[in-house]
């Protein structure tokens, strides 16, 4: 496991999982939300974003969390491991509201500076409808990668904990 993509619905726990996996394995972690959003929630221009994706996947090791469908194929093709956090939608929506409260007026650690936490109806609706609208195409894509990539589909917080616990600890460089 050297190049890991972590995908799933908003609120599935991608950033937390990636951070914990990075701590456990020693792999560098890149949160796409932190890389994409500039102060005031301004997105990175597409040409810069595409160049950044190519630069990131060219690195020797990484964990990249986030969906960003337009450029997902670049990451999926470069990865050796894909982890899909396929959490229940009620849990994802609960987590959206929880982080909204926890980070009210502040920027989350997995976002760029100048992007205070906010929640809008469009995003909540996307998360609520994720299983119906986004998940089928994602599962279809993953099925085409079976045999080429190591794919894990984790469906509960318990499965996430068990997965992280079984990871070998990072080798010490001391």
Image (cartoon, grey):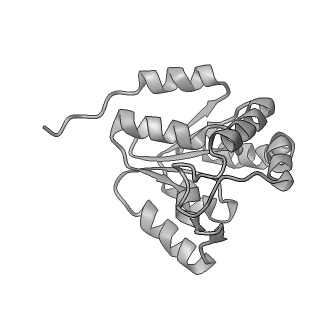
152 sits left or right of 143 in the view: left
Q: Is 148 in front, or is 91?
A: 91
Quarter the N terminus occupies: top left
Is 28 situated above or below 70? above
Residue in the picture at 61% in, 78% down: 45
Residue in the picture at 65% in, 72% down: 42
Q: Is residue 100 visible?
A: yes
Is 117 situated above or below 15? below
Count of numbered badges drawn on the protein: 0
Where residue 12 sits, quadrant-wise, is top right
Where residue 48 sits, quadrant-wise, is bottom right
157 sits left or right of 97 in the view: left
Residue in the picture at 45% in, 35% down: 20
Residue 70 screen position, x and y as percent: 68, 65
Residue 138 screen position, x and y as percent: 72, 47
Residue in the picture at 71% in, 32% down: 87
Quarter the C terminus occupies: top left
* Farthest residue, direction front: 105
Q: Is residue 147 visible?
A: no
Q: Is 111 in front, or is 125?
A: 111
Q: Is 47 in front, or is 116?
A: 116
Residue 30 screen position, x and y as percent: 47, 54
Q: Is 139 in front, or is 55?
A: 55
Residue 96 screen position, x and y as percent: 72, 41
């Amino acid at each position: 496991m050297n190049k890991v993509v972590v995908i799933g619905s908003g609120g599935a726990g991608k950033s937390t999982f990636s951070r914990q996996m990075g701590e456990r394995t020693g792999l560098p972690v890149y949160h796409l939300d932190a890389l994409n959003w500039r102060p005031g929630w301004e997105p990175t221009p597409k040409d810069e974003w595409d160049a950044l994706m190519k630069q990131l996947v060219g690195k020797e090791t990484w964990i990249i969390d986030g969906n960003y469908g337009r450029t997902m194929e670049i990451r999926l093709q470069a990865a050796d491991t894909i982890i899909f956090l396929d959490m229940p939608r009620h849990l994802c929506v609960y987590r959206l509201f929880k982080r909204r409260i926890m980070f009210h007026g502040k920027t989350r650690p997995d976002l760029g500076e100048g992007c205070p936490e906010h929640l809008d109806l469009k995003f909540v609706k996307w998360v609520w409808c994720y299983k119906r609208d986004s998940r089928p195409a994602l599962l279809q894509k993953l099925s085409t990668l079976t045999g080429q990539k190591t794919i894990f589909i984790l469906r509960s917080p318990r499965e996430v904990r068990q997965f992280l616990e079984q990871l070998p600890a990072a080798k010490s460089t001391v």
